Amino acid sequence: MDIEVVRNATLFAGLDDEATSALLKFMKPRSLRRGTVLFREGDEGDELYIVSSGKLKLGRESSDGRQNLLSVAGPGEIIGELALFDPGARSTTVTAVSQTELLSLKHEDFMTWLQERPQAAMNLLRALAQRLRKTNDTVGDLVFQDVPGRVAKALLDLSTRFGKPAPDGVLVAHDLTQEELAQLVGASRETVNKALADFAGRGWLRLEARAVVILDMNRLKARAH
């Protein structure tokens, strides 16, 4: 297992070789094919997962069956960190949207490791604070920002984490269906598709299968604000 995968995760950033190697001894690899559910909302859980490669979507389902996509996690990101300190029911359903490789860590093993390394607890608090801040931003966007603005902001966020240079811009292979992208911004598929078509018509981006190529980053940033 690659030691850098663990070091790139927010929770374990800054660990020395000894601490990281000790932690890796407790971790187990896991592979998921596209469409495979890692865990469901309401499942009991006591494991944290670090994404080594691939992407997963985190979502919730309303009482009337509607789906809401909260976020997309990629390499170096952590899933299920709350279960390390408070094992219990999962708050989201997590599903692979591409072939995904993970490292898992159980609550009991983590606590054994943490007793000698209290600095990691500070890292966890920082990671949780970052997640709370992002949640607050998302709520604010839903209240105050129009759908095209939310689409632009979502694409910029995806480009920051998954974007790769392309000959004419930045390729963002998000691996999401049109419906999933609509769920991510909290709008109907028709409204999101209309916004994407408008952006494409203005020359800001090019649409591809489960991906976009951002051609004018500055214009997209301006629309996101």
Image (cartoon, rainbow, N blue to C red):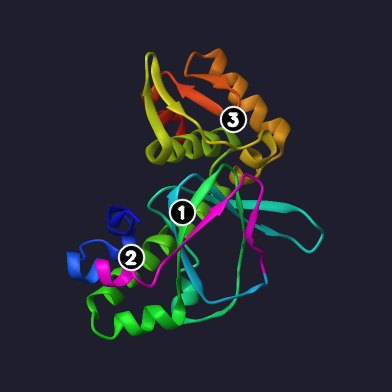
Q: Which residue is mark 1?
A: 137
Is residue 35 on the magenta stretch? yes
Q: CA distance from mark 2 to mark 3?
A: 30 Å
Is residue 3 on the magenta stretch? no
Nearer the observer, disc 1 or disc 2?
Answer: 2
Evaluate if marks 1 and 3 touch, with contact meaning CB atoms under 8 Å apart.
no
In this rendered view, identify the residue nearer to me: 193 or 118: 118
Q: Earlier in the sequence, mark 2 or mark 3?
A: 2
Q: Which residue is mark 2?
A: 11
Q: CA distance from mark 1 to mark 3?
A: 25 Å
Q: Amino acid at mark 2?
A: Leu
Q: Does residue 223 show up?
A: yes
Q: Amino acid at mark 3?
A: Arg
- Element assignment for label 1: helix
Residue 210: which numbered mark, if any?
A: 3
User: How would you rate the neighbour count of disc 1 (Cα within 10 Å): few for under 14, some for 14-19, many for 20 or more?
Assistant: few
Residue sitting at x 54%, y 53% = 31
Q: Earlier in the sequence, mark 1 or mark 2?
A: 2
Q: CA distance from mark 1 to mark 2?
A: 21 Å
* Quadrant of the snapshot with the N terminus: bottom left
* Quadrant of the snapshot with the C terminus: top left
